[in-house]
Amino acid sequence: QVQLVESGGGLVQPGGSLRLSCAASGSIFRIYAMGWYRQAPGKQRELVATVTRGASTNYADSVKGRFTISRDNAKNTVYLQMNSLKPEDTAVYYCSGAIATPGGVINNYWGQGTQVTVSS
C-alpha cells in the first residue's frame, strides 16, 4: 500500500503565498517523477508542475515565475511553493507520484487533494 497525503492548503488573499507539501508513505522502493495538478469547479484537472527524481522541473505556463516545485527524496516529499497567488489559482490541488514498490511494479498514485482558495 502506498499513500500520498497533501497538506498546506487554505484561504489566502490575492498576492499572497502558500506552500503545499505531499508526503508519500507505505511500501515504497523508489519514487520517480512527482507532480502537482489542480482542478477548479467545473473544469478538468490540469497539470501545474512536475519534478523528476533528478530535480528537472516543468511548469504550466499559467504558473511559471510564480510557483516552484521541489522535492526531498530522503523524506519522500514533494513541495509546491506558490507566490503571487491569483483568484484563478483557486482549485483543489492534488499531488501525484510514479512509485515503484519493492516488487518492482510502478504505478501512479494520487493524494486526496487539498483546497486552495484565493480571495479577498
Image (cartoon, helix red, strand yellow):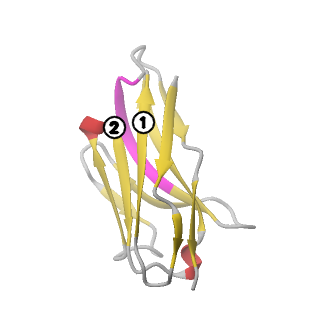
Question: Above or below — where is 79 with respect to 104?
Answer: below
> Could you say which disc has been placed on residue 38 in the image?
none
Where in the figure is residue 36, as x and y percent of width and height?
Answer: 47, 55
Where in the figure is residue 71, as x and y percent of width and height?
Answer: 30, 49
Quadrant of the image for the C terminus?
A: bottom right
Please, what secondary structure does the residue beneath circle 2 have?
loop
In the image, which residues are magenta? 28-36
Judge the density around disc 1: few (<14), some (14-19), many (≥20) Cα neighbours within 10 Å.
Answer: many
Frontmost residue, 8 versus 39 = 8
> Could you say which disc has been placed on residue 24 in the image?
1
The residue at which mark 2 appears reads as 76
Q: Is residue 103 magenta?
A: no
Question: Above or below — where is 1 with respect to 62?
Answer: above
Q: Residue furthest right?
A: 42
Please, what secondary structure does the residue beneath circle 1 have?
strand
Q: Report the side of 26 relative to 52 (left or right).
A: right
Mark earlier in primary sequence (1, 2) = 1
Q: Main secondary structure of the magenta part?
A: strand
User: Residue at horizontal 43%, vertical 73%?
Assistant: 63
Q: Is residue 33 magenta?
A: yes
Judge the density around disc 2: few (<14), some (14-19), many (≥20) Cα neighbours within 10 Å.
Answer: some
The answer to whether mark 1 and mark 2 are in CB contact below 8 A is: yes
Q: CA distance from mark 1 to mark 2?
A: 5 Å
User: Residue at horizontal 43%, vertical 47%?
Assistant: 22
Kindly identify the amino acid type of the residue bearing the numbered disc 2: Asn
Frontmost residue, 52 versus 91 = 91
Where in the figure is residue 69, as x and y percent of width and height?
Answer: 34, 59
Question: Above or below — where is 18 with respect to 65?
Answer: above
